[in-house]
Image: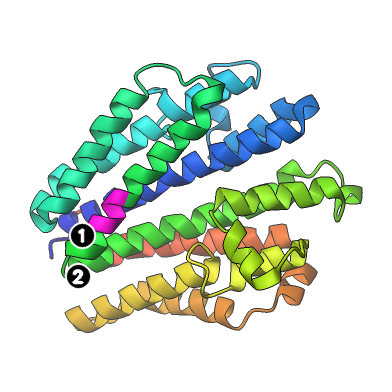
Amino acid sequence: MLGKTAGGLFWMFRYLERSENNARLLDAGFRIALTRSASASEEWKSVLKTAGSVTDYEALHGTYESKKVIDFLLRDLANPSSVISIMKAARDNARLVRTALTREVWEATNEGWITLKELLDQPVPEKDLPDALSIIRKQNALVRGATHGTMLRNDGFHFTQLGTFMERADNTARILDVKYYLLLPSIAKIGSSLDNVQWETILRSVSAQRAYRWLNGDQISPANIAEFLILHRQMPRSLAYCAQQVDESLGFLQEEYGVEHESCRLANMVHQKLKTGQIGEIFEEGLHEYIEGFLFNNSSLGAQIERDYRFQG
């Protein structure tokens, strides 16, 4: 496969995953702001920091009002990280690699773009935000379903999976980091009812609340939730699960092309560290420091994949 095509598939699916992740992040911020109305502006600022958009936002706005933040993250074309901007980038990449996609995947992507363009043509009222975010998630689910149901498990498919799980791991790590590094008002609040509400909101933002309760019942604790989202290999948004998928896809590509690449070694290193990790050791190191290290390694791996498979042609 040409490097340009591989890169198009990789970034198409990174962008698709990112648009859904931003919708989930907005949902988390919206729910937490409702529970802490007195400090809602700080909650919205933390959402922007997680999305990496706080600098761009501050260049246009002076206050962190919910209406302004929601509009900026959903539909502002001046924001390259807005959902509408990201979906356009995903569709543009899909057009470039259309011959590598099945008809069903292309149609689901194109229809998703048309649906969201209409949905976000006007500002979304706060009362309608949960429904709008649900539509964004569903449109992405349609593309995923078409991908898994119709594409050959060849090199093209594995580049789509690399894009998906590299992006998903990055998002889960950033949401966790926001929880303890940005959202928590004081170390004294850890373990309080407020802290538990925030942890539950984080679970809901990654669609993991019910799965967590299947394993842990009603026991809400920072250690259990962090372990679930970092180390639980059956949780499809955990760091461990994402690392396993990336490792397996790069292993397939290495075998398919008969070339040993540095990215495969790096992916295996990240996977093995998570596979043997213990939550006690992570908390002893510091959750924020651990996540910072993971994000650095994930970013380095992404850059190495681009070099190894010559995405720039």
Displayed quadrant of residue 164: bottom left
In the image, residue 161 above or below residue 41: below
Q: Residue at label 1?
A: 6
Query: Do the residues under discs 1 and 2 have CB atoms within 8 angstroms?
Result: yes
Q: Is residue 310 left or right of residue 226?
A: left
Displayed quadrant of residue 31: top right
Residue 155, numbered label = 2
Is residue 276 one of those drawn in magenta? no
Displayed quadrant of residue 263: bottom left
Is residue 145 one of those drawn in magenta? yes
> Which residue: 57% across, 58% down?
208
User: Which amino acid type is shown beneath numbered disc 1?
Assistant: Ala
Residue range in magenta is 142-146
User: Which amino acid type is shown beneath numbered disc 2?
Assistant: Asp
> Which residue: 28% across, 60% down?
160
Q: Is residue 59 left or right of residue 144?
A: right
Residue 16, numbered label = none
- The answer to whether one can see residue 134 in this image is yes
Q: Nearer the viewer, residue 191 or 13?
A: 191
Q: Nearer the viewer, residue 56 or 75?
A: 75
Q: Split into 4 quadrants, where in the image is the C terminus?
A: bottom left
